[in-house]
Image (cartoon, rainbow, N blue to C red):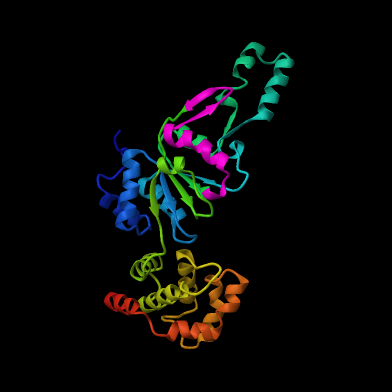
Amino acid sequence: MSPTADTPPTPNGLRERLFKAGYIADEDLASLIWMGLTLERPLLLEGAAGVGKTAVAGACARALGRPLLRLQCYEGLDLSQAVYEWNYSRQLLEIRLAEAGQADRAALRDNLFSEDFLLQRPLLQAIRSPTPCVLLIDEIDRADEAFEAFLLEVLSEHQVSIPEIGTLKALSKPLVILTSNGTRDLSDALRRRCLFHYLDYPSLARETQIVRTLVPEAASRLVEEAVAFVQRLRREDLDKVPGIAETLDWVRVLFHLGHGELPVDHMVLVPTLAALLKTRNDRWQVTAERVGKLVDGPRIAQDVGVAGAMK
């Protein structure tokens, strides 16, 4: 077992590639991805919604120059949507041609259930790709336990068993990234086959760096104040805590409104909170008065220290 040709020789090398691809990974995450590439093991990323789990797969695809295949999981997901199904319309056409004498019946009997008549879905596409890809299995905790059990063969053996054909082995081994929001417990069997990492909301310093990198046109003071506001907002009792994507959207909104810092008039901020707050209850709870306290209230010592050090 050895790293593929596109695997950087060190985790730091991979971290630099991810940065160039627009994703700021910490040392632990970069090391995990590098280990996954080196050991050809799937990665399981767990954490709350909005912490950037899904974005990891896209960044890996860009950093490695690989295509990205995505399987969005949901309750009721089955093999026909995730792995394969037979092209029944084409099979029926071939049968009718054979009945009309325009096709070899003996050959049709042998080939009717062959790869030529398979419609490949993301899992099968990933392992039958002639070149390695990045396979994102998003929100695996939303899928049924039966589907999770089927995944074990794909993740550990890099193959798919189809009753009519037999076992289709991988032509290349994808980098598999599974994400979970923790809505249900995953099986021990699945966890044992994966390298695990828990993604939390970024620190003030790291989120500031992320926003500065991805929204470079925004003023430094605006970025610092907006990120500090979101960090404090996450400590509120919200139904849906804003993630990194919401922070980026909010800073872009404020930039396009012409703000170089958070406005003194807090009423101006209230309409823009649609970028951060995604439920009726949260919008009702975060009033203009509450916004004022979050903007002007005393910052925790860590906020002040980090923000001051970064100026």
Q: Is residue 173 left or right of residue 81?
A: left
Decide if residue 241 is in sight here: yes
- Of residue 111 and residue 47, the one placed in the foreground of this image is 47
- Screen quadrant of the C terminus: bottom left
- Screen quadrant of the N terminus: top left
With respect to residue 58, does 102 lie above or below? Answer: above
User: Residue extending furthest bottom?
Assistant: 265
The image position of residue 25, as x and y in percent, is: 34, 57
With respect to residue 298, does 79 lie above or below? Answer: above
Q: Is residue 110 left or right of residue 39?
A: right
Tell me the residue at 30%/54% (across/down).
15
Q: Is residue 63 magenta?
A: no
Query: How many numbered markers are drawn?
Result: 0
The image position of residue 156, as x and y in percent, is: 42, 34
Tell me the residue at 48%/60% (across/down).
48
- Of residue 211 and residue 176, the one placed in the foreground of this image is 176
- Of residue 15 and residue 280, the one placed in the foreground of this image is 280
The image position of residue 58, as x and y in percent, is: 44, 51
Tell me the residue at 44%/83% (across/down).
295
Q: Is residue 178 left or right of residue 284?
A: left
Tell me the residue at 56%/40% (across/down).
147
Residue range of the region highlighted in magenta in the rendering: 141-168
